[in-house]
Amino acid sequence: MKGDNRNTKQKETLIKVLRYIKPYGFLMTLTILMAVISVVLTLYLPILTGDAVDRIAYIFDPSELSVDVTMIWAGLFGILKKMAVVVALTAIAQWIMNICNNQLVYNIIQDIRKKAFRRIEELPLKYLDAHAHGDIVSRVVADVDQFADGLLIGFTQLFTGVVTILGTLGFMLSVNVGITAVVVIITPVSLFVASFIAKKTFRMFKLQSETRGEQTALINEMIGNQKVVQSFNREGKILEKFDEINGRLEKCSLRAIFFSSLTNPCTRFVNSVVYTGVGLTGAFAVLGGRLSVGQLTCFLSYANQYTKPFNEISGVITELQNALACAARIFELIEEEAQVPDKADAVVLKDVKGNVQLKDVSFSYVPDKKLIENLNLKVEPGQRIAIVGPTGCGKTTIINLLMRFYDVDEGSISVDGNGVRNITRKSLRTSYGMVLQDTWLKRGTIWDNIVVGKPDATKEEVVAAAKASHAHSFIKRLPNGYETVIGEDGGSLSGGQKQLLCITRVMLSLPPMLILDEATSSIDTRTEIRIQKAFATMMEGRTSFIVAHRLSTIQNADVILVMKDGHIIEQGSHRELLAKKGFYAQLYNSQFAIA
Amino acid sequence: MGKLLVYLKDYKKESVLGPLFKLLEASFELVVPLLVASMIDVGIANGDKSYIIKMCVVMTAFGLIGLICSVTAQYFAARAAVGFATRLRHELFAHIQRLSFSQMDREGTSTLITRMTSDINQVQSGVNLVLRLFLRSPFIVFGAMIMAFTVDVKAALIFVVVIPVLSIIVFGIMLVSIPLFKKVQSGLDGVLGITRENLTGVRVIRAFGEEEEEIQKFDKETDALKRMQMLAGRISALMNPLTYVVINGGLIALIYVGALRVEAGILSQGQVVALVNYMSQILVELIKLANLIITVTKAVACGNRIESIFEIPAGLEEVGAAQGEGKSRINGGGEERGTVEFDHVSLRYHSGGEEALTDIHFKAQRGDTIGVIGGTGSGKSSLVNLIPRFYDIEKGSVKVDGMDVREYSLAGLRDKIGIVMQKAVLFEGTIRDNLLWGNENASEDELWEALRTAQAEEFVLQKEKKLDERVEQEGRNLSGGQKQRLSIARALVKKPEILILDDSASALDYATDAALRKSIKEMPGETTVFIVSQRASSLLHADTIIVLDDGNVAGMGTHQELLKDCQVYQEIYYSQFEKKEGAQA
C-alpha cells in the first residue's frame, strides 16, 4: 500500500518533469534520434570488423575462395572505408546528442529555478515565516542541481542503454540464434545481482544521508555562531562532538560506499562468464561450421556491449529515483499556494491622504491562539500614532497587517476609504515607508542599497537623504564612499550604521505614510535625537506609525496606543496617559527608575 | 588540490593496496584476449575441443580471481577515501574554528558551510574514483599496448601513436574544463546568495514593491550560470566523440596493417583478433574514464575551494603561549590579578582603513565596574572585544592581570573572561547544556545561582522541565529577552575574573535591567565588570565611565565628573533624561 503510494507519487512527479520538457520537444526528438543513430552505428561496427577479420583469413589462406588476392584486398578496403564513414557519423551523432542533452537539461533547470524563485516572491509571508530559510534555499540550489545531474545522466545512459540492449539483441539474432540465447539467459543474472545489492545498500545510504544532515546542522549552528564558541573556549568540546558524528559518518559511509561498489565487480564477473560462454559455444559453432571466426569476434564484442548497459541501468535507476525525489521537493515549493492575487479591479492608490481605519480587526498566527481581537482604530491624515507595550503584545503584528503581509481573519482595514483587499499590494506597500528593527541590506554598493525605492534618484537627492539621516558622514569615510561594496547581510557595517542606511532609504523615497518599528534601536541616543529631528520634518503631514521601546522617542506622538495581550488598553496623548497613572505611566516611570 | 593529499597519509596502506589489487584484476583482464586468440588459433584451427574447454575454464577462473581482487580493491579504496574525507572534515572544521573574527566576517558563513559539506563530499567521491580507476585506466591502456607488442611489434606501433593522442585529448579537455567548473560553482554561490537575500529581506523587498526587479536580478544570475554550465558542457561533450574517432581510426589502421602482416605470413588470424580486442578494451576503458572525468574535474575544483580556506592562516598567533602561561601563574596570585590595562591602544580592522580605535589608555582595577558609552560606530564593541583578544591591535598593548594578552594562550586568556554579546545566541540542547558551556563541572546550585543573578530564574522555573527544557537551534523557541538573560547566566556560570556585557540587556525592560545590574554588583568575589550600553542610566553607578567618540576617548570618569566636564557625555545624558533634568538638579 505504502509502496503503491510512493509509486503514484513518483509517477506524478515524472509527469510534471515531462511537462517541463515539453517546450523543448524538438531538442528531445533530436537527441533521441541521434541516440538511435549513434547506437545503431556503434553496433554495426563489430559486424564490419568481423567481416574484415574474415577477409584476413582468406588472405591467409586464399585457396578457400576462388578469387585472387587483389579482389580480397579490394573488398577489405571497401569495408575499411565503410568503417571510417560509420565511425565519423557515430562521432557526429554522439556530439550532437551531447550538445542537445546539455541544452535540454540546463534550459529545463533554469526554467525550474526561475519558476521557483518567482514563487518565493509570491508566497504569503505566513509560509516564509514558518519555514526554515535554509531548507528553501537548498531546494532552489542543491535539489535543482541534483535533479540536473540525475536528468543528464538519466537521459544519456538510460536511453542509450535501452537502445543498445535492443540493438545488440537484434544484431545478434541476425547472426546466430543459439549463441544469442546463451547471452540472453546469462545476462539477467547480472541485473539480479545489481538490484539485490541496490536494495541492500539503500538503507545504508539513507543512514549516511541522515548522519550527514546531523553533521550539517551542527556545522551550521557552530560556524554561524563562531564568536560565542570562541569566547567560551568551546572549540575543543565542539570538535569532540563533531568528531563523534564524523566517526559515525565514516563508519556508515564506508559501509554504504563499499557495498554499493560491489555492484560493479560482481556484474563484471557475470559479464566475464557471459563472455566465456559466448567463447565456448561460439568456438564449437565455428568447429561445426555454423559460424565464421569473424562472426565470433563480432559476437565477443557484442557480449561486452550487451552486458554493459545492464550494469549502468541499475545505477541509473537509483540516480533517477534520487533525481525524482529532488524534483518532488522543488515542485512542492513551486506548487505551494501563492498569496491571493490582486483583484482585477483593484485600486491603485494615488495621492494618499493618509486616512487609515481598522475596524473590528481580529487576527492570529495560529488558529487556537488569538492574538488580536476586535481592534478598532481611526487615524486622521498626518497623525502620529505610537504603539507601545511589552514584548509579544502584538505591536509588530499590527504592522504586518497594515502592510498586508498577513490578511486579517475578521474585520477590515482601509486606507483613504478603500479596503486593503481592494488595493493593489504594490501601491499599498509603496505608500508606506518602512524601517524595521531587523535591518536588511543586499549585496551591492551603498548606493544600490539606498536607491531601492527610487532607482532614478540623482546624486544630490541621495546625498541630501543621507545627510538628513546622518549616514553621510560615515559613508564618506568608507574606502569608496557611496560606491563601497558591502557583503552579505551588510558585512562589516555596525548595527547602527546598517540602520542609518535603512533610514536613508526611506528618506529618499519619501512615501506618503511611515512605519517605524524600533527604527532607531541600534543607534545611540545622541544621533537618534538628531535623526528624530529629520523624522519630525518627514512626518510633517504624513500619517506615521511608530513602534518604540524607548518611551522618550514617542512622547510627541498625537496618539499613543498602549497594547497588552493583543488589546489596546489605553489610548491618548503622553500627557493624558501620564495623568491617568495607568499601565503607561507605570512603564514610563520604570524607565527612569535608578537602581 | 595537491596539498589536501597529505590527509591520505594515515591511509598509505589502503591507498597503495587499493590500486594494486585493481591492477591485479586488470592484469587478468588483459590476458583474456590472448586466451581467446589461442582458442582461435590452436583450439579452432586444430579442432581441439578439450583445449577450447580448458581455455574457457581458465578464463572463468581468471574472472573469479579478478572478482576477488576487485572486491579487495574496492574495500581499500573506499576505506582510504572515506578516511581521507573524515580527516579532511575534521581538519577543516578545526581550522575554521581557529579563524579570527575578521577572517570569518570576510569569508561569510554560508560559503564556509558549503565547503564543509558539499565540497568535501565531492572530493571524497573523487578520491574514491581516482584510487579505483585512474590508475586502472592508464594501466589497461598501456598494458594493452604492451600486450600488443608481445603479439607483433610493427602492428603495436599503431598503439604508440593512438595513446598519446588520446592522452592529449583527455587531459586537454580536463585542463580547459577545471576552471570552468570552478566558475560554475561560484555561479551557484551567486544563485544561493540572492535566494537567501530574498528570504531574509522579504519584508523590505515587498514594502518597496521590488519583487519584479529581484526576479530580473535572479534571472540574470541564473542566465549567467546557465551560460557557464553550457560552456563547460560543450567542452566535455567533445570528449566522447573525439576519443571514439581516434580509437576506431586506430582500429581501422590495425586491421589494415594486420592484413598486411597476415599476408606476409607473420601474424595469424587469431592474433589479429587479439589486437582488435586490445584496441576495443582501450575504448571501453576510455568511455568509462570520460564519464568519470567530470566527477574528478568537479572534485579538483571543489578541492581547490577547500584548499583556499586552508590557505587562510589560522587566526591569531599564539607566540609566547608557553612561557606566558607560567608567568601568569606567578602573577595569578599577585596584586595585578583581575586588572585590565589598555596602554595607548590603536586598532585598525583592515590595513589601510580608518582607525577604529585611537590611543585608548586606561587601567581597570580588580572589582571595578567600567561603563563604556558612545555613539553608533564609536568603537564600544571594538574596545571590549580586545580584552579576550578577538582582534589583534596595531599599536600599544592590552594587559590582563598585568600581562600582554598576546603572551597568553587563547584558551588560557579566554578562560578568565566571560563575555556576553549583543546578539544572544543559544545552542540546541537543554537549558542546562547551554549553561554548562560556562563550566562543565558547575553544580546544580551554581547554575541556579547564575540564573538568579541573570534574572532568569523566574521564567526557567515556569518551564515545564525547568533546566532540562529543550532549546531549539539558535534558541528559536525563546523570546529575545529570555535568550539574553540565559546568555548572561551562561557567562556567569563561568565565574570569570572579568565579565563583559556588550549591550547585552537591550531586549530587557528597564526594571529588569536595573535588577540585573544590582545583582551583578552584589555578586561574591571581586569581578571586574565592563558594561557597554547606550543607556546612560545603566552606567550611572560605574566606577569609571569611558566615553567614546569616533574611536577616541572623549572623556573618562564617574558620572558626576563627566556630567560636569564632558560635553559628549552631557549630550548623551540629556538626550535621555531631558524631562527629569529639573527633578535631578
Image: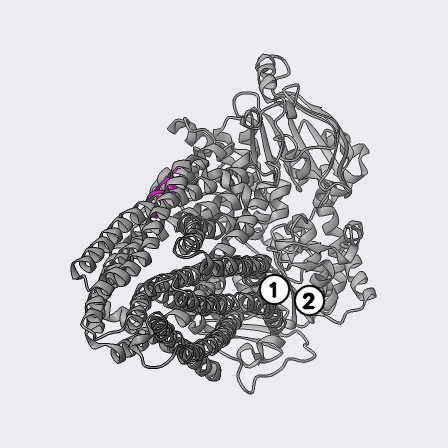
Q: Where B296 sits versus A184, above or below?
A: above
The kind of residue tagged 2 is Val
Give the numbered dot on residue B331.
Answer: none
Residue at the limit of the structure toward the right, as seen here: A460
Label 1 residue SS: helix
Quadrant of the frame with the C terminus of chain A: top right
Q: From the viewer's perspective, is A267 left or right of B563?
A: left
The kind of residue tagged 1 is Val
The lab-note entry on whether marks 2 and 1 share a chain reads: no
Residue A246 inside the magenta-drawn segment: yes
Residue A238, percent from left and from top: 45, 37
Q: Which residue is mark 2?
A: A452
Q: From the viewer's perspective, is A460 left or right of A381?
A: right
Residue A222, percent from left and from top: 49, 43
Q: Which residue is mark 1?
A: B204
Could you tell me what secondary structure mostly forms the magenta stretch? helix
Residue A69 visible to the viewer: yes
Pointer 1 local density, CA inside 10 Å: few below 14, some 14–19, many at least 20? many
The residue positioned 83% from the left and 65% from the top of the image is A460
Q: From the viewer's perspective, is A247 left or right of A519?
A: left
Q: Which residues are magenta?
A: A244-253
Chain of the residue on which disc 2 is drawn: A
